[in-house]
């Protein structure tokens, strides 16, 4: 082992009260330049710091949680690109902004199938109890890695129209408008805080039971009929959710 590696290994042993993985995370944090670069492999980091692979994984998990690193399956671990007009700070102020978010990120489909929906979702879509709906489950990715787990339900007729569409670089909302010819007029949203379920945490590359936002959204066409119901878990440390509110312009009072 070279003197350099021995010196770096000693760095993570000089504070015995601080866990090694936190010392390693601190060292790696200082090395990051925010340029989207691939960092050293786990094997290389084990050799560099003279620790086991579980310790390195713990250190990397800390930086992934902080949004400083993201993992790309089959390619490695990368530093979060530095932002020019940080997309993670997009302000959501309209349905148009939500559609634009779909254009700026990419969506990996996990499943899409026809399922029997629970009563609350059937009610939201104004379907009879026990009805079938088309379900799409996937994960949305940004420059910082996966940040949204989405489960969407649409009425069967809409499902048949978009069943084979490529959703990787667009939003389901935009796809409905484009291929079904149904303009979406407004949305109802309920936001809650949650702890990430294990399966969703794995897909978002965060620790199970990490704090996370849960959105339940119902989208309505111009005629008032629901066209989509979605449950979205969002890792906001990686892609903060921001909204803007404005007061409608008041008509000037005429004398």
Image (spheres, grey):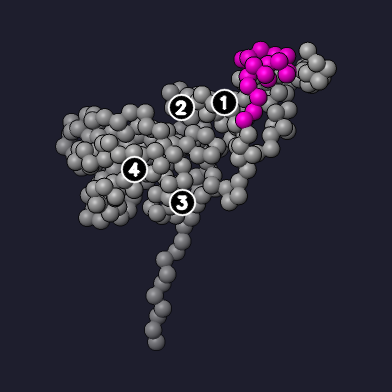
Q: Which residue is mark 2?
A: 203
Q: Does label 4 or label 1 sit earlier along the sequence?
A: 1
Q: Is residue 152 above or below residue 226?
A: above
Closer to the observer: label 2 or label 1?
1
Q: Does label 4 or label 3 sit earlier along the sequence?
A: 3
* Residue 191 shown in magenta: no
Identify the element where label 3 is drawn.
strand
Q: CA distance from mark 3 to mark 2?
A: 24 Å
Identify the element where label 1 is drawn.
strand
Q: Is residue 118 visible?
A: no
In the image, which residues are magenta?
38-54
Q: Does label 2 or label 1 sit earlier along the sequence?
A: 1
Closer to the observer: label 1 or label 3?
1
x and y percentages locating residue 160 in the rendered image: 21, 38
Q: Nearer the viewer, residue 100 or 125?
A: 100
Q: Are marks 2 and 1 in contact (CB under 8 Å)?
A: no
Residue beneath the point at 37% across and 32% down = 109
Per the rendering, the mark at residue 172 is: 4
Q: Does label 4 or label 2 sit earlier along the sequence?
A: 4
x and y percentages locating residue 195 in the rendered image: 47, 29
x and y percentages locating residue 156 in the rendered image: 20, 38
Q: Are marks 1 and 3 in contact (CB under 8 Å)?
A: no
**Quarter holding the N terminus?**
top right
Residue beneath the point at 45% across and 22% down = 198
Q: Which residue is mark 1?
A: 76
Q: CA distance from mark 1 to mark 3?
A: 31 Å
Q: CA distance from mark 4 to mark 1?
A: 29 Å
């Amino acid at each position: 082992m070279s003197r350099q590696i021995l010196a770096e290994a000693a760095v993570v042993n000089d504070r015995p009260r601080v866990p090694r993985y936190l010392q390693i995370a601190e060292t790696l944090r200082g090395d990051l330049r925010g340029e989207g670069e691939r960092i050293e492999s786990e094997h290389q980091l084990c050799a560099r710091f003279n620790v086991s692979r579980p310790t390195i994984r713990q250190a990397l998990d800390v930086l992934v949680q902080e949004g400083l690193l993201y993992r790309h399956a089959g390619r490695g671990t990368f530093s979060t690109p530095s932002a020019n007009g940080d997309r993670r700070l997009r302000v959501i102020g309209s349905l148009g902004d939500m559609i634009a978010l779909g254009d700026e990120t990419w969506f990996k489909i996990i499943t899409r199938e026809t399922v029997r929906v629970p009563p609350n979702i059937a009610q939201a879509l104004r379907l009879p109890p026990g009805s079938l709906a088309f379900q799409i489950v996937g994960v949305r990715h940004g420059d910082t890695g996966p940040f949204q787990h989405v489960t969407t339900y649409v009425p069967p007729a809409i499902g048949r129209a978009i069943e084979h569409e490529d959703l990787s670089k667009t939003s389901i909302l935009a796809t409905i408008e484009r291929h079904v010819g149904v303009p979406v007029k407004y949305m109802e949203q309920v936001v809650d805080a949650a702890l990430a379920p294990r399966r969703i945490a794995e897909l978002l590359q965060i620790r199970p039971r990490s704090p996370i936002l849960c959105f339940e959204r119902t989208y309505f066409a111009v005629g008032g009929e629901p066209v989509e119901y979605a449950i979205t878990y969002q890792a906001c440390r990686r892609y903060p959710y921001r909204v803007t509110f404005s007061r409608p312009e008041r008509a000037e009072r005429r004398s």
